[in-house]
Image (cartoon, rainbow, N blue to C red):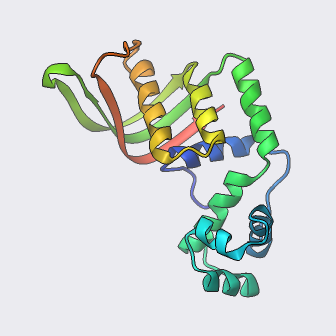
Amino acid sequence: MSLRLSADTVQEALDRADSRHWTRTPPRSTRARLTYLRKQTRHDTATLAQLLQANTADLKALRETGQIPTDHPLYQSVEREVIRLWQPRVRRRAHDTILANGGQMMLSFRAWLGFTAAAGSSDDPRLRFLTLSMQAPYPEALFTARHHDAPEAELRAILNDALSVCYFHRNRPAHTTETVSLDRIDYLEFYY
């Protein structure tokens, strides 16, 4: 569906992983995608424009012509929203199945990963390429936050907590000041 093979946000990475569970393909043409998105926003062009971070004139022109370059930001916004909204019941069913079977997911990323502990000690952020296994309760927390359309900052905080456990192989007590930070994500992909 997309020329981009990886995501650079937690939200998009979860949506791309969910797309592997779809039972039908989403609309392919730009016109069909816009029609689908208009139905999702109850045919309110202003709401759709706000959702896509575009103006209504651009949307009307796009709906009339149906042509837009694939590297255009509006094309990418339309594609991202279709992926985000397509087959929500299939998505929830896949999440429920994953959680019922132990709630494990794999995570691959290339990003700046750092660690800060009490008393000023730290492992300065370095570019790392890692593949890790995330165990419960973190997949459930990510799915729950995603179902509630949590902001990217909340999803990233959950991911940072998960990385502190699965990368450093220890559970952190709630009162510690240790933090793991995943910054400047270049590549992020979930497998489940």
- Where does the image place residue 41, in percent across and percent down from the top left? 74, 64
Q: Is residue 17 visible?
A: yes
143 shown above or below 79: above
Q: Is residue 86 above or below residue 37?
A: above
Where residue 133 appears, x then y in whole percent? Answer: 53, 23
Q: Decide which of 6, 161 is in the foreground and name it.
A: 161
Quadrant where the image shows the N terminus? bottom right
- Is residue 132 rendered to the left or right of residue 44? left
Q: Position of residue 32 (x, y in %)?
A: 80, 71
> Which residue is at the far right?
24
Residue 133 vertical position relative to residue 23 in the rendered view, above or below: above
Question: In the rendered view, does 188 fall on the left or right side of 103?
Answer: left
| Front-most of residues 192 and 155 | 155
Where on the picture, by quarter, is residue 73? bottom right
Quadrant of the image containing the C terminus: top right
Total numbered circles: 0
In the rendered structure, the answer to whether residue 174 lies left or right of residue 18 reads: left
Residue sitting at 78 percent across and 71 percent down? Answer: 43
Name the residue nearer the viewer: 153 or 106.
153
Residue 71 seen in the figure: no
Q: In the visual, does 159 lie left or right of 111?
A: right
Q: Which residue is drawn at 65% across and 75% down?
A: 46
Image quarter for residue 13?
top right
76 or 187: nearer the eye? 76
| Spot occupied by residue 110 in the image (x, y as percentages of width and height) | 41, 41
Residue at the location (85% across, 51% down)?
Answer: 24
